[in-house]
Amino acid sequence: MRDPTDLIGNEAEAQLEEQEAQRQRLQELDDYKWLMGHKQGRRLVRQWLADAGVYRNPFNHSGSVTAFNCGQLNAGQRLLAKVMEFAPEAYLVLLKEHANE
C-alpha cells in the first residue's frame, strides 16, 4: 500500500509504472508488425476479422444472436483498430492479397 505522504516514493513508483507501460506498448507494436509482416499472419488476421463479422451487419431477428454477433464484432473491431494503429500499411497489403485470391 502506498504511503500518501511519501511523495518521492510515489513519484518514483509512478515513473516505473510509466516505463513498464511504455515497454509493453513497444512490445505490442513489435508483435503486430511481426504478425502483419508475414503473408501467413495477414491471412490469419483477415480470417479473424471475417469470423468476427467486421465486414457484415450483426443484426439477426433473434435478440440473443444479435447480442452475440455484436460481441464478436466488438472483438474484431478492437483487432482492426490495433492493426490500423500499428501496421496500417500491412493492412493495405492484406486487402490487396485478398482481392487477388
Image (cartoon, grey):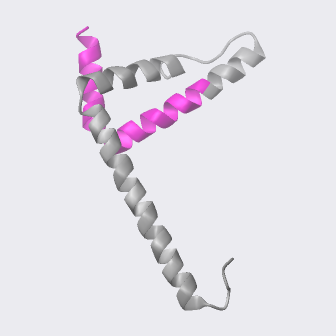
Residue in front for this viewpoint, 98 or 39 = 39
Q: Main secondary structure of the magenta part?
A: helix
Percent position of residue 3, x then y? 67, 85
Q: Is residue 93 within the magenta segment?
A: yes
Residue drawn at the location 63% of the way across and 20% of the way down: 69
The location of residue 91, given as percent across then percent down, is 30, 30
> Which quarter of the rendering shows the N terminus?
bottom right
Pick the residue in front: 30 or 93: 30
**Quick check: 59 left or right of 33?**
right
Tell me the magenta residue range.
72-101
Query: Residue 87, located in which quarter of the rendered image?
Result: top left
Q: In this rendering, is residue 90 above or below 66?
A: below
Q: Residue at x 52, y 75 (%)?
A: 14
Which residue shows up at 61% across the image and 18% down it?
58
Residue 21 belongs to the span the image colors magenta: no
Q: Is residue 11 above or below residue 51?
A: below
